[in-house]
Image (cartoon, rainbow, N blue to C red):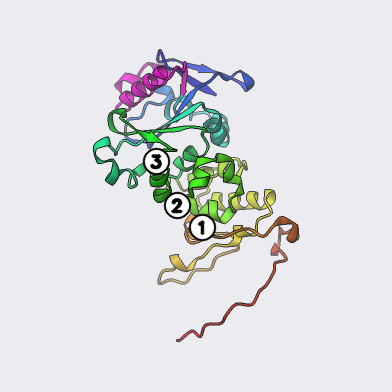
Amino acid sequence: MSLLRSAIEALEEFQGENVPDYAILSHTWGNGEVTFDDMIGGLAAQKAGYDKLLRTMKRARDDGFKYVWIDTCCINKASSAELSEAINSMFAWYQNACICYAYLEDVSASDMDEAFSSSRWFTRGWTLQELLAPRSVEFYGKDFQHLGSRETLVSKISSATGIDKRTLLNRDRIWRNSVARRMSWASKRHTTRIEDMAYSLLGIFNVNLPLLYGEGAKAFTRLQEEIMKDMDDHSLFAWDARTHCDSIPKQYGVFAPSPKFFVHSGNILPIPSKDTMPYMMTNKGLQIQMRSCMTSLTKIKD
């Protein structure tokens, strides 16, 4: 991975176990972000995002870190291999960082109570893993004013995200949540590219995928297929299309078209794996054995 020196505007490459301690930035992209090519070409100072870069470097220096990772300028997006490695490693990179700076540029300390929960940062797909993976998250607003930590702001964060406080305070609890519940965390989030809605969730489900930009919503289907291979959790199928029906009837397969179909699935718990049978996708569809149970019947009027 490439890391930015916090003292000078220079990138250094590290491999394997030789990666030093580093801070990491979580933010939402705007116009004029400093890119990898800008750093190599000495054009960083000409970009609108240069001030954000300088403030992040200073914050890292003040906290005693020689290196910081920023997605906009530390990934060579011209290399498909490097981009694929970065996206598949992103969760681990945030997980291994000593500290994460969450920059909410639309929030200031003076309007914290009103603006924090409605920040754009809470609506983006990529920032979900950036909230959950790091060991420590410190929030900063406009002009890099310190707003608080994940611990001190946990009630506000839980309200804004729908993620329970215990999971927010203990990242090891991520894996104890059902697939459906984890999907519900992403149900109201968005990404610029359709495929990124799936790719941004790879770490949340501890799976890997090759990147195929241009495949559109098929990326989310591939994600669910990979989850099904690795996890014995029937809640993957506990999504609801009715919320998203329009005037034109639609037919859906066994997999949800997007995370938004899990918006009401946050309270679903998985059946213990010892009580389930193996299941698989075949050329005829899903082959699965499931429990059935009686429910009270409600008469539906025409």
For marks 3 and 2 on the same chain, the one whose residue lies earlier in the sequence: 3
Residue designated by label 2: 162
Please tell me whether residue 233 is drawn above or below residue 75 in the rendered image: below
Mark 3 vs 1: CB contact within 8 A = no
Identify the amino acid type marked 3: Leu
What kind of secondary structure does the magenta stretch mostly adopt? helix
Answer yes or no: is residue 109 visible: yes
Residue designated by label 3: 153
Neighbours of disc 3 within 10 Å: few (<14), some (14-19), many (20+): some
What is the magenta range?
Answer: 39-68
Which element is circle 3 on? loop
Residue 266: image tag: 1
Please tell me whether residue 173 is drawn above or below residue 140 in the rendered image: below
Q: How many marks?
A: 3
For marks 3 and 1 on the same chain, the one whose residue lies earlier in the sequence: 3
Mark 2 vs 1: CB contact within 8 A = yes
Q: CA distance from mark 3 to mark 1?
A: 21 Å
The quarter of the displayed image where residue 141 is located: top left
In the image, is residue 42 part of the stretch drawn in magenta?
A: yes
For marks 2 and 1 on the same chain, the one whose residue lies earlier in the sequence: 2
Which element is circle 1 on? loop
In the image, is residue 155 part of the stretch drawn in magenta?
A: no
Answer yes or no: is residue 214 visible: no
Rendered-image quadrant of the C terminus: bottom left
Identify the amino acid type marked 2: Gly
Please tell me whether residue 81 is drawn above or below residue 167 in the rendered image: above
What x and y, as percent, mark residue 254?
60, 63
